[in-house]
Every structure is written in C-alpha cells, then in structure tokens.
Image (cartoon, grey):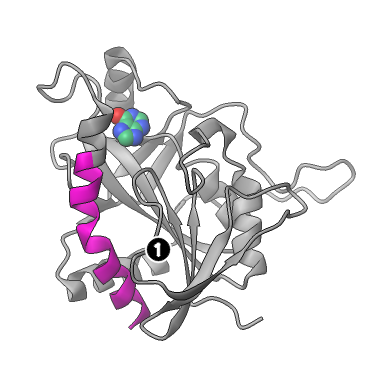
Amino acid sequence: MAGLDLAVIGGTGVYRLASLEGAEAVGGDTPWGKPSGPVRVGTVAGKRVGFLARHGEGHALPPHRVNYRANLWRLKELGARRVLAINTVGGITERFAPRVLACPDQLIDYTWGRAGSYWDGEGGEVLHVDFGDPYSPAFRAELLAAAARAGVAVLDGGCYGATQGPRLETKAEIARLRRDGCDLVGMTGMPEAGLAREAGLEYACLAVVANWAAGCGDATEITLADVLANVEAASAGLPAVVEALLG
Ligand code: HPA
C-alpha cells in the first residue's frame, strides 16, 4: 500500500473533493465496524489523497451515530499520516462570523455516550494519551502556511466546543460555552480528535462557520438553508488549501 499523503474528512455540506482525480472507492468493514462510507482514494496535484464523507455520502448519519473509530481506523489502514478534518460549526465569539474558516487550537468535549477510545477492551492495555494540545501543532502550522500560500483567509486559533446534537443548542447552553471559553460550536469534533491522537495520526481541524450560534447573531432562527449556503460559500477556498498542503 502506497500510503496517503493526506486524508480529508468532509463535514456537513462537504461530501466530495472536487479536485480528486482517478478516485477508487475503498469500502468494507473494519475491526470497529463500518465507516461512514467508502474512502475515495485518488490524486490531487499528483499526490495520493483519501477523502471520506463523515456523515456518509448522502448525509444519512447524524453526529452521534458516526462510527468515528471505524473512520479513523480505515484512514490509518490506508496509510494516512495527516488527517485534515473539515467541520461545520456555529460561531460564538465575534471573530468567528458565518463564512469564516478557522483552525482551532483547543477544544472542550461536551458529548456523551459516544465510543471514544480504542482502548476499550477487557484485559487490554490502557493508554492515557497526552491531549493538552488536541490538534497537532505541526500539522496546524502546515495548514495555516498552506492557506496563506493559497491566499485563503483562515483564522489561527480558537476553542471548539463539541456538543452532542443533533439538535442545535439553547441560548443558555451557548452562553455557558462562551463562559467556558469556546469560540466555536460543532457536533463532530469529538471523539474524532481524541481517537486520531490515540491512533498516532496528525490531526487538524478546518472549521467552516455556517451560522451564528444560538443567541449570538440577529437571526431569530438558524435554518438549514442558511447553514448550507454559508458552508458552500466558505468552502470555495478548500480545494486551493488542500492543493497547497500537498505542494
Ligand atoms: N451548533 C452546533 N453545531 C453546528 C452549528 C451550531 O450552531 N452550526 C453548524 N454546526
């Protein structure tokens, strides 16, 4: 297996990588069950890239039903070293307005009941991985440099609050996240980042701000139409960032 120069996990509204050429689908089960769908393995700028739609290619899987363990296992099996996670989020603090791209450097996990570790069996080894910096500092730096080379604005830093979903949050929940220090809120950041660390993958998040989180903007309601329109607009720069990452 030739390995992958980059693996990309697409979030809500990002179901394919337009620049992926000659892609083959790699499917099937892993020891942790079924991934969200096939990994499309092809080339971008002559480099091997694997793309996986986190929610499935038809967006059938809600955040709490995604098999995060199987997804990362499959990418690792394919020889991924670096995993670029694209996560659609709501913006809480001022800088993180709809249509902004951001590369958070911290997270707080509010999810529950998700299978969050590979060290889950009886009698097996238990490993407490360091997670002080939940995103790979080296890969974050590469990502930010690539975005700069590509001329795509990406905010450096911010704290991602991972909520359970699939419903959106109450205004009081978002006020609490703000008090806790969260800048962004999304439903898929964990346990994905923790599992990536356990698997020894270099993992970074490119957050696509789709809406103001509840109570943060002027909107009286967060609609799916607004979310998807903002993701589509903000995602325009993603192919250039991916290409620059491979350059
Ligand atoms: N909250 C949680 N997840 C999200 C949001 C939000 O407001 N927008 C997009 N994903």
What residue range appears in magenta? 229-247
Residue 89: horizontal and vertical position, in percent? 31, 39
- Most prominent secondary structure in the magenta stretch? helix
Identify the residue at image location x=28%, y=24%.
179
Q: Quadrant of ligand 1?
A: top left
The residue beneath circle 1 is 137
Residue 195: horizontal and vertical position, in percent? 60, 50
Instruction: Report the front residue among 48 and 144.
Output: 48
Instruction: Report the front residue among 183 and 236.
Output: 236
Can residue 58 be seen at all in this image of the molecule? yes
Can residue 183 be seen at all in this image of the molecule? no
Instruction: Report the front residue among 206 and 133.
Output: 206
Drawn side of residue 47 relative to residue 156, left or right: right
Residue 29: horizontal and vertical position, in percent? 73, 53
Residue 243 lies within the magenta run: yes
Identify the residue at image location x=20%, y=33%.
226
Identified by mark 1, the residue type is: Pro
Q: Quadrant of residue 162?
A: top left
Q: Quadrant of residue 201?
A: bottom right
Neighbourhood count class around disc 1 (C-alpha, 10 Å): few under 14, some 14–19, many 20 upward: some
Drawn side of residue 177 relative to residue 60, left or right: left
Residue most toward the bottom? 46
Instruction: Report the front residue among 181 and 200.
Output: 200
| Secondary structure under the numbered disc 1 in the rendered image | helix
Image quadrant in which the C terminus is located? bottom left
Residue 161 lies within the magenta run: no
Residue most toward the left? 218
Say whether mark 1 is within 8 Å of ligand 1: no
